[in-house]
Amino acid sequence: MSGAVSTIRSGGLEAQIAHFGAELVSLKDGEGREFMYDGDPAVWTGRAPLLFPMVGRLNNGQYRHAGHSYAMDTHGFARRSTFTLVSQTGSSVLFRLTSNAETRASYPFAFELDMQFELDGLTLKMRATVRNPGEETLPFSFGYHPAFAWPLPGGGEKLEHRIIFAEDEPADIRRLDTNGVIVRSEASPVADKTFALHPDQFVEDAMIWDELASRELVYQSPGGPALEIAFGNLPMLGIWQKPGANYICIEPWAGIADDAGFTGEFSEKRGIMSLLPGAARHFTMDVTLRPR
């Protein structure tokens, strides 16, 4: 980990957030146990990138707007941008990314993206705010992409870990092709609200719930701590790892990769939201440690 980092603390947690990407890079409990992935560059350097102004990949790496084509990398540019530190207290920190000449080269819109992190006891509260300071409608998507330790510290073996959804999840999930676009559906892996994790499930990349019933879930292993994750206004979910790695990404999204063959306007892309001039929209994700 390099570059500027801000540290915040509560009675039970400590979080570190990198200014580059406004990325959560560490979440420890009072015993010093780490609940985030370590960002091993030999495996994957991400830890909790922010997905903006889109989620996933574009067909052929391009999108269309007002008669022009623009190129944009997977998950947008926020994760590779340095945010401005706006304010910080002992338990909270606020970052901001604002449109500039570099962002307009691939995304010709005025925007502000604020990212706030706040610790309250054993809960980390994350709140993203997208604002439209421009004079035209702002089309965008947003998502979280945290990589939690797998196995959890102090828990059971890796294959004992489970994700417990708040609701039944009978709808089919979506799968990606080798170009990262949506190509097919398959039966839900959730039975009795429970998803039993196994590295083999991710050989074909992420598992994507685009008809998600739950807005809360618990990531846990028998006999160890658990993470309760709430994401009230993010209607989709991706779960992903590089098979065999020591992390599991639990990713609430408001947006999704292109469907294979999609050639419409960016504003017509599935999962794109439209923000009127002067308006704002918020996206929250709370992670609560449940000690054992």
Image (cartoon, helix red, strand yellow):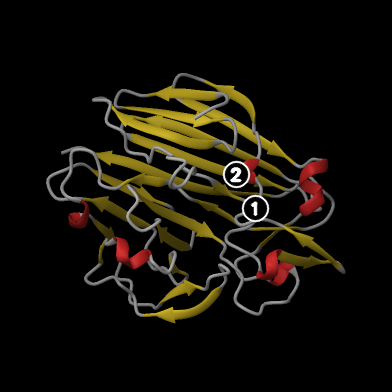
Identify the residue at horizontal 80%, vertical 40% (top origin).
Answer: 100
Q: Secondary structure at mark 2?
A: helix
- Quarter of the view holding residue 186: bottom left
Q: Is residue 159 above or below residue 170?
A: above
Identify the residue at horizontal 65%, vertical 53% (top origin).
Answer: 76
- Locate residue 176 relative to residue 107 in the image: left or right: left
Q: Are marks 1 and 2 in contact (CB under 8 Å)?
A: yes
Identify the residue at horizontal 20%, vertical 57% (top origin).
Answer: 159
Q: How many marks?
A: 2
Q: Is residue 231 above or below residue 33?
A: below
Q: Position of residue 2 (x, y in %)?
A: 54, 27
Q: Is residue 106 above or below residue 20?
A: below
Q: Position of residue 193 (x, y in %)?
A: 25, 67
Identify the residue at horizontal 87%, vertical 69% (top origin).
Answer: 67
* Residue 79's disc number: 2
- Locate residue 164 relative to residue 259 in the image: left or right: left
Q: Secondary structure at mark 1?
A: loop
CA gap, disc 1 and disc 2: 7 Å
- Quarter of the view holding residue 30: top left
Mark 2: amino acid = Arg
Is residue 110 in sight in this rendering? no
Mark 1: few, some, or many residues within 10 Å (few <14, many ≥20)? many
In the displayed orientation, state which residue is furthest to the left.
Answer: 223
Mark 2: few, some, or many residues within 10 Å (few <14, many ≥20)? some
Q: Position of residue 167 (x, y in %)?
A: 30, 66
Is residue 118 in sight in this rendering? yes
Residue beneath label 1, please? 76
- Locate residue 172 relative to residue 194 in the image: left or right: right
In the displayed orientation, state which residue is furthest to the right.
Answer: 67
